[in-house]
Amino acid sequence: MIDSADSRTTRREFLKTTGQFASATALGAAALDFANSAGGQPAVHPGGGDAIQIALVGCGGRGTGAADNAMTAKGGPVKLVAMADVFQDRLESSYNELKKKCEVPQDNKFVGFDGYKKAMDLLKPGDIVILTTPLAFRWVHYTYAIEKGLNVFMEKPLTADGPCSRRMLELNKKAEAKNLKVGVGLMSRHHRPMQELYKRVQDGEIGDIIYMRGYRMHGPVAACFVTKWPGGTPSELLWQIRNFHSFLWASGGLFNDFYIHHVDHLCWMKNDFPAKAQALGGRHYKFTPEGEPYVDQNLDTYAVEYTFADGVKLFMDGRCINGCNDIYSSYAHGSKGSAIVAKHGDFGPPSMTFKSQQQGRSNMLWTSKSIPGEDDPYVNEWVDLLDAVRNNKPYNEVEHGVKSSLASSMGRMAAHTGQEISWDDMLNSQHEFAPDVDKLTMDSKAPLVADASGKYPQPMPGITKTREY
Ligand SMILES: NC(=O)c1ccc[n+]([C@@H]2O[C@H](COP(=O)([O-])OP(=O)(O)OC[C@H]3O[C@@H](n4cnc5c(N)ncnc54)[C@H](O)[C@@H]3O)[C@@H](O)[C@H]2O)c1
């Protein structure tokens, strides 16, 4: 885990440097505008009512939803003009859902690992590309978007390991320098009830935060547990991409994919990111009811204790097992009271505050109200991004996107290794899960190849201690 001392970035330096980015963004906007008009790539849309073109890279469930949100949100018109995916069927089923709102010619639909370039080549600087593949490809696609001067909406998580986290932050400096607007799909931060709760917590309504709790416990969902690759078509690589929640290289595993929302919005309430994590986790069900072994890299239970620099704790519990007590909500506890952050799901309202740790009606201080037209954070995040594009406002969410991804990876790694993992350990880790992901073609071998029995390396806490596999 530990590499040479001089190459290590400490948490304090990291938070300080990335904090400087944030303020540099605001200060730099006007200067960059000037730079742009003086020979850099011009932003095409500020102020105008002209159509913003979008390209969709990764035409699955979320990508289709994001494109639809973009074309629905106030701040348009927005027009989908190009699509790319590695699966033809995914691209076509996505287009079937979207075509009532747009027309994408057949020539503007691209299948393959290089499709992202062809789709982005059809945009002009200042247009927006949507990056909604599994996270493994995020830095590759972001690199090209920055090169092309495109604004970006990209889904969470952004990274699954230390090297990609460092790379994304470096890349983001280039996006900042070009004054690009970048939204990240941590939608809780665009949910109006949570925004008001955030203000109330900062104003001291529940006192100093002492501890926070996040729970996401339900049955298995998406492709978090898989049995072995059947062979043939799709190739092992494409099959892993289709089942990305099962593979750490593709998604960071179910921990990063599912639990990042609670980790993110609780860190937001605290205005900080954790300094270290220790965790428990286990795999109770290793076989299907028919007796076939599961071969994915996930555990079915996780319990992470995060500690912030001031000693405050964040407890994140996750479980993917049927028939247990399902809980999917989050809470903050302070010296003067407490709060329900997400009452159900990743952001489900109402958010509430209480004057005690007993969260009953008689102790309630505040409950969030619906704001007609602003109740969907997936639309709000587009309203906010389009407003930034149209009005040339500073807007870049990559910093907290990377930090929340890194915090998720810390918790996952603590569970997978059975060790305490600090922020600096995670940030400086040299284990890159898929170093050559930018070179993949349809014929490539998968970044992780099964052994003769069809199995992949799985976490072995206490035995494999400095890497997760
Ligand atoms: N914010 C949220 O609430 C939310 C909800 C769901 C998913 N997500 C995130 O969105 C991302 C996608 O999730 P999903 O549920 O839509 O998965 P999905 O499998 O439905 O969609 C992903 C799509 O990307 C395509 N793809 C994979 N690699 C590609 C590549 N190199 N180039 C082009 N296309 C590629 C796949 O074929 C697939 O069509 C994930 O990062 C996930 O965590 C976020």
Image (spheres, helix red, strand yellow):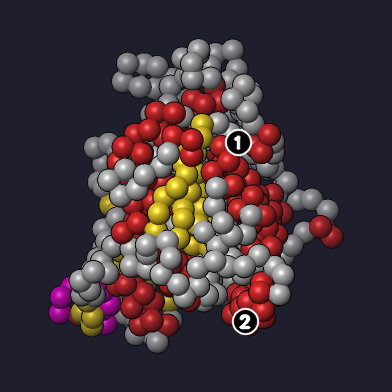
Q: Quadrant of residue 191?
A: bottom left
Task: Indicate yes or no whether the magenta region holds residue 357.
Answer: yes
Q: Is residue 100 left or right of residue 165?
A: left
Residue 417 part of the magenta-drawn span: no
For the residue pair 204 and 53, the one nearer the viewer reads as 53
The residue shown at (38%, 81%) is 199
Identify the residue at image location x=33%, y=78%.
196
**Mark 2 in CB contact with mark 1 (< 8 angstroms):** no
Q: Nearer the viewer, residue 381 or 94?
A: 94
Amino acid on which disc 2 is placed: Ala
Answer with mark 2 or mark 1, whichever residue precedes in sequence: 2
Residue 326 visible somewhere in the drawing: yes
Q: Which residue is mark 2?
A: 30
Measured along the vertical axis of the image, is residue 389 above or below residue 404?
A: below
Secondary structure under tag 1 reads loop
- Secondary structure found at label 2: helix
Amino acid type of the residue tagged 1 in the rendering? Asp
Looking at the rendering, the quadrant in which ligand 1 lies is top left
**Of 464 and 61, the residue lying toward us:** 61
The residue carrying mark 2 has its beta carbon less than 8 Å from ligand 1:
no
Task: Judge left or right: residue 67 versus residue 251.
Answer: left
Boundaries of the magenta span: 351-362
Q: Give x and y (percent) for residue 169.
A: 66, 60
Q: What is the residue that sits farthest to the left in this orientation?
A: 362
Quadrant occupied by the C terminus: top right
- Residue drawn at x 37%, y 62% is 77
Residue 276 location in percent, x, y? 59, 60
- Tell me residue 274's x, y (percent): 55, 65
The circle drawn on residue 114 is 1
